[in-house]
Image: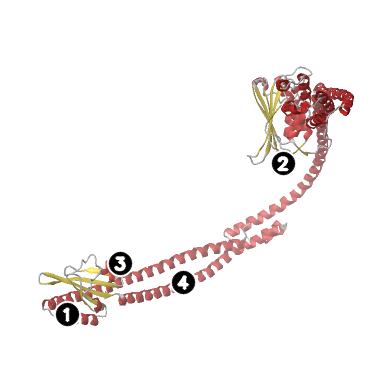
Amino acid sequence: MLTASGIRRKLMTVMLLLVLTVLALFTYWQIYTQNALLQAELRKQTNLMLENLHSRAMFQSHQLRRQVQEEIASLNLFELTSTLTEASRINQELDFVILTDADNKIVIHTADRSLQQQIYRDADYPDKLVIAIAGPEPDPARWSGAALSQALQSAESIFYQLPVEVGNRHWGQLVLAFSLAKLKAEISSSQAENAATVRRHTLNSMLTAFSILLITFLIISWLADTLSAPIRRLTGLAQRLSKGDFTVAGQVDSTRNDEVGVLSAQFAEMAVHLEKAYLDLEEYNLLLERKVDERTQQLNQRNEELMQAINELEDSQQQLVHSEKMAALGQLVASIAHEINTPLGAIQASAGNATRYYSAFANSLQLLLNRATPSDQALFLWLLHNAGPMESLTTREERAAKRSAITRLKAQGIPRAEDIAEMLMDMGLAQQTDTLLPLLQAPHYQEMIECACELTGVMRSNQTIYSATARASKIVFALKSFARQDQLGEKTASDINEGINTVLVLYSGLLKQGCEVIKEFGRLPLLQCHADELNQVWTNLIHNALQAMEYRGTLTIQTYLEESGTRPQIVVQISDTGHGIPPEYKDRIWDSFFTTKESGEGSGLGLGICRRIIEKHNGRMFFDSQPGCTTFTVVLPLQATPDRFQHQDHPAATTH
């Protein structure tokens, strides 16, 4: 709010700034004008002194040239030297005189006699102005006062060069050097006097301006006090009125006939109206408070009802998500049962083989102990140390390795080559037939190979049991991870790649029917999320992709971290080579209870639930579909800049 003191301060500031600006401009103009006049007068005096010096020098130069020409004509060179020396002594402005002959050799030098008979050069005399006079006078346009002053700014002396003519013959040159030191000293003295005059004038102007400014300040202060006094009074009354003092209406002075009097009368009228409005407002506030209390009670009751409805809706949604999850799990029961029965059958068969191998080895043990020679023992020990599990070879590679071993054995004349090659294949030694051949010179090598094959068979059976047990445990662990439900509803740090791998393990039985899986997993940070809900998303998308391909095709899963935007985010893309989504269904696939599957295969809640789960994580979910390629993309933003990555690096691309 602008107070009376503020008005007074602003009024004084504006008027003082205005007066100060005018005084400053006037003072500057006066000082500038005086300085310009003094400078112009100094230039005029300088040009006049230069012209006088130039005129005197020209007069003396022509006089000396006539005397020099006369004395040269009379062959009186001794008198000529005295004349030039005397002229240099009498004229204080003339430094020296030089007379040269036609070959430019110095004949007379009044300042330095040692230079006589030497060649005269202008370069020996720097800081000079050379004025060559060919006729009676130099060029007046070139050597006027202003031009001469400009030319002499950096010169210390003036050289007048006059040709010397004797009769009609050019005899030489006369050079007169006039010093400018005295003239420049006079000019410097005049400049100092001008500077002192300017300083005195500046000081007087500033004192005058300060006096005017002080007088103006006093006048403006008096006027501001006179004009702002009634406004200050009204300001004080307004402050009291703002605090609820309505008695100020009778204290207003409205007898003035100017604008302030009108303002005071209107202020008094406003105070009366405000008092009436204040009383009405108090009564209205009491009524409003009662209505607000009643409305608040109603809103609190409705909020409680709304919170109860929201809690019931959340419980229903959790049950719906869990039901959909269990429904998807139910569709995998047959495949999972087959996946578990397969390793159980392998365990049962391997246990029977281990018993059979042990019984056979027990029967051969007596031969090994009683009849084995040192070479037989060496062969037996080599087989035990180098035997291992059967190599993971294709059928074609297995047949080729077996044929190669049989060929080498027959080439060495080994009987029962086919049986020996078969046992070497079982022990994983078919590729080392060449190393084994020298050891087959033992007398009982066939019995040693059979005994080693039976003993190592127990190891191979145990290896098979271990692999089958690990496979069954992996399936059970994946099933347990998938079926768990987060009861607390809190987010935990989870590995997205690990969750997708869990779902792929559960679908391994269906994938073996003819589906190729390509995994392109990037290195991802741990994500704060509801892992069980995201596993439901991956399950639904992978199951839909397999059904779209009728379990025959290529399933591509790609994950990567996108850091190009303002906030890093994890991107998951699941693509299939199925028939695609028809154009008429693309706008309806997110609708609840919409499905194109037959009765009993789907409820139509899958994609709708998936989208709500992703939106719950502040993410996005969209798709792109055309015949032969459908890609669903899930984008999950990170809560903060990732500072810790998962410990295991997933391969860039894996094909199953």
Q: Residues within 10 Å of mark 1 (few under 14, many from 20)?
A: many
Kindly check if marks 4 and 2 are in contact, taking CB atoms under 8 A apart as contact: no
Q: Position of residue 341 (x, y in %)?
A: 84, 22
What residue did someone put label 4 on?
206
Q: Is residue 319 left or right of residue 220?
A: right
Q: Position of residue 101 (x, y in %)?
A: 17, 72
Which residue is most to the top? 598
What residue did someone put label 1 on?
80
What residue did someone put label 3 on?
150
Separation (CA) of disc 2 from disc 3: 82 Å
Kindly check if marks 3 and 1 are in contact, taking CB atoms under 8 A apart as contact: no
Identify the residue at horizontal 71%, vertical 59% (top origin): 247
* Mark 3 or 4: the one toward you: 3
Separation (CA) of disc 3 from disc 4: 35 Å
- Report the number of numbered marks: 4
SS type, badge 3 = helix
Separation (CA) of disc 1 from disc 4: 64 Å
Numbered label attached to residue 645 = 2
